[in-house]
Amino acid sequence: MEKKKLILDCDPGHDDAVALMMAANNPHFDLLGVTTVRGNHTLENTTINALNVCQYLGLDELPVSSGCAIPLVRIPPKTEERVHGESGLDGPVFEKLTKRVTGARAVDFIVDQVKKFPNRVTLVVTGPMTNIGLALRYAPEIISLIPEIVFMGGSWQYGNVTPAAEFNIFADAEAADIVFRSGIPLVMMGLDVTRQALCYPEIIERMANHKNVAGKLFVDLMHFFSMAQKKVFGWAGGPLHDPTCIAYLMDPSVIETKEMYGEIDTSSGPSYGRTNCDVFLLEGKPANVKVSVKIDVDKFWDIVEECIKHYN
């Protein structure tokens, strides 16, 4: 069976780093490359963080391309030092960085790979959708060549950066609007599910039993992330948002989804960035997104552990 080809578009970020660890060195996937975007931190830092994670895990040949430094339209919102620290990836100690980005810009890399492997490249988006929205505007011919976009973002209930909006969508709602209107099959891992995947201390202890680079990275990441999440939100464990995308692609049964019609609020009011999801299709518009509604938490952590074992 052919491995599923992926591009991971991300803004590391602790949970992005775990998603990258899970997607790489995985017998289920052919990870073609990593593209970075401004989100949890500045583009400079998210790119450095992606390179550091790749170097730490020994992913020397994995391409990393730098992407958009600002949203398509809006003034860039504040980055998330509250939960990710000054570097955007506080906690682990990395050696001197020698890995470098590829020459291709993120948008060019995405377009080129989709054209090279038509109908075979799944886009996994764990940060703001700036790179993806721009790629669809720059090369609209790729829209029909993308079989699926699985993304972490949004919520069909309530947000985490405003009462209405989740951070990734809020950071570039205009780009998300382009993606939602594209007609590409979408799978949304929203806060409704990711907040169920809390990394409690016993999970950190469990993954610490694996004495390899992935286990150590997970532990170092989650010690800081969980501490920060408790300080900001009062949770005993940090929600592991982005890895839900990878877990779903490995085993769709881990997450229950419901087909809905979704659209992005790009108004200038207090609901800017909200993912308005018509749960019951009350408006009669055809469903355009599979929205996650429930997660098998035990199975999720088994999948995360399985990915860590791949580095033995």
Image (cartoon, rainbow, N blue to C red):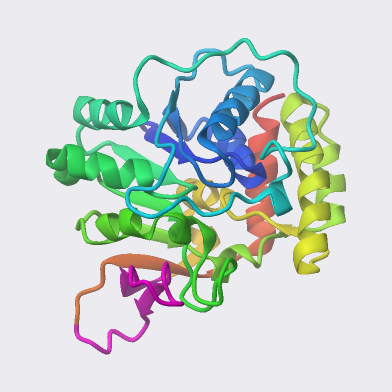
Report the residue that reaches farthest toward the front: 75
Report the residue that reaches farthest toward the bottom: 282
Q: Residue 284 lies in what quarter of the image? A: bottom left
Magenta region: which residues?
Answer: 258-284
Residue found 42% across the figure and 44% down from its top: 124
Quadrant location, the C terminus: top right
Q: Residue 17 lies in what quarter of the image? A: top right
**One can see residue 277 in this view:** yes
Residue found 51% across the figure and 79% down from its top: 157
Give the answer, above or below, for where 283 lies relative to 71. Answer: below
Residue found 57% across the figure and 34% down from its top: 46
Residue 279, position in %: x, y?
37, 82
Residue 244, position in %: x, y?
55, 53
Residue 309, position in %: x, y?
70, 32
Report the residue that reaches farthest toward the top: 98
Question: In the image, is residue 82 part of the stretch drawn in magenta?
Answer: no
Give the answer, above or below, for where 143 lies relative to 36. Answer: below
Give the answer, above or below, for where 19 lies relative to 104. Answer: below
Residue 170 horizontal side relative to residue 235, left or right: left
Residue 97 horizontal side relative to residue 286, left or right: right
**One can see residue 237 in this view:** no
Residue 108, position in %: x, y?
28, 27
